[in-house]
């Protein structure tokens, strides 16, 4: 078994604001996950699916907060990398009688529709789907458009923005009313930012994408790794300054 023990670790969760829940990444190639509730329909939207091994831990963490994983009807992806999409395959099997719709943009959607294993596992990481006890197969994907609006019940309206740099398929989800940004691996707390050395990555694009989200009005920064913040704009600005300092060395 690869990464022994991570599959049984409960993903610690907490309520960010009413209707928004954060579940902390497990160690070793996993990601933060976010649940947003649709009170109108009694359904749940999941942002990023984790590495598959951590799915049981997500379900346990959700249960601890009174959330039923069987009500997950939509999954929204930030990008195509292993730690964000492998959970799709396990989730679809688990919810086989009522599988969720999967939403992705551009390159991410194409890779998942094609079942392109080499692009899900970026670079020479020395890992494979077998280590996660699953097989990469073509998936049915709902393709999103840039600047498309996503409504989750009557409470949340997200805008999709294309923000490449970490990967070709990277997008951010922004809710202007509640000032929520879900940036995937574009920008993190503490001055950190996404890697740009994987295939499809670009430091110049990463800088431009962080500059773009730095101009949004953000309270709640909910990134793919590390912690979250309710002081979003200063965190993004710190990361923007740090990534600019990297550029100055080239």
Image (cartoon, rainbow, N blue to C red):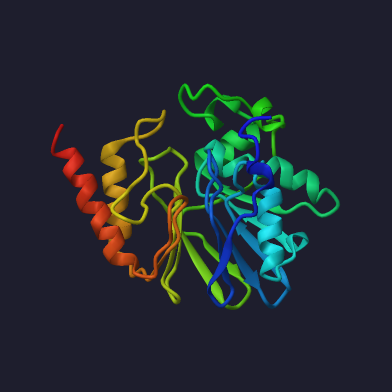
- Which residue is painted at 66% across and 69% down in the image? 65
Q: Is residue 35 above or below residue 249?
A: below
Q: Is residue 42 above or below residue 149?
A: below
Side of 176 relative to 42 (left or right): left
Quadrant including the N terminus: top right
Q: Quadrant of the rendered structure where residue 52 is?
A: top right
Instruction: Return the residue found at the far front.
Output: 5
Q: How many dots with numbers?
A: 0
Instruction: Return the residue found at the far right.
Output: 97
- Which residue is painted at 48% across and 29% down in the image? 122
Q: Is residue 191 above or below residue 216?
A: above
Residue 54 at x, y percent in the picture: 64, 46
Residue 137 at x, y percent in the picture: 71, 31
Side of 105 relative to 42 (left or right): left
Q: Of 3 and 145, which appears nearest the observer?
A: 3
Q: Quadrant of the rendered structure where residue 243 is?
A: top left
Q: Of 39 and 86, which appears nearest the observer?
A: 86
Quadrant including the C terminus: top left
**Is residue 51 something that shows in the picture?**
yes
- Which residue is painted at 43% across and 57% down in the image? 227
Residue 135 at x, y percent in the picture: 71, 29
Q: Of 204 and 122, which appears nearest the observer?
A: 122
- Which residue is painted at 34% across and 36% down in the image? 196
Q: Quadrant of the rendered structure where residue 166 is?
A: top left
**Is residue 140 something that shows in the picture?**
no
Instruction: Return the residue found at the far left.
Output: 248
Residue 48 at x, y percent in the picture: 57, 51
């Amino acid at each position: 078994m690869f990464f022994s023990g991570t599959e049984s670790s409960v993903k610690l969760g907490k309520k960010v604001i009413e209707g928004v829940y954060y579940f902390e990444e497990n160690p070793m190639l996993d990601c933060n996950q976010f649940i947003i509730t649709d009170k109108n329909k009694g359904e749940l939207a999941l942002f990023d699916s984790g590495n598959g091994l951590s799915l049981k831990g997500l379900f346990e963490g959700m249960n601890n907060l009174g959330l039923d994983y069987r009500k997950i009807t939509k999954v929204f992806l930030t990008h195509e990398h292993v730690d964000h999409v492998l959970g799709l395959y396990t989730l679809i099997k688990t919810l086989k009688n009522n599988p969720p719709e999967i939403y992705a943009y551009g390159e991410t959607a194409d890779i998942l529709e094609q079942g392109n294993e080499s692009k899900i596992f970026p670079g020479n990481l020395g890992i494979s789907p077998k280590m996660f006890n699953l097989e990469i197969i073509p998936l049915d994907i709902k393709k999103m458009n840039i600047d498309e609006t996503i409504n989750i019940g009557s409470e949340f309206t997200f805008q999709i923005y294309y923000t490449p740099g970490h990967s070709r398929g990277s997008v951010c989800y922004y809710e202007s009313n509640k000032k929520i940004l879900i940036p995937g691996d574009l920008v993190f707390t503490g001055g950190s930012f996404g890697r740009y050395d994987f295939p499809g990555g670009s430091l110049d694009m990463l800088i431009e994408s962080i500059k773009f989200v730095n101009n949004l009005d953000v309270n709640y920064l909910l990134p793919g790794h590390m912690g979250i913040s309710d002081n979003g704009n200063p965190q993004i600005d710190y990361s923007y300054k740090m990534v600019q300092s990297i550029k100055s060395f080239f």
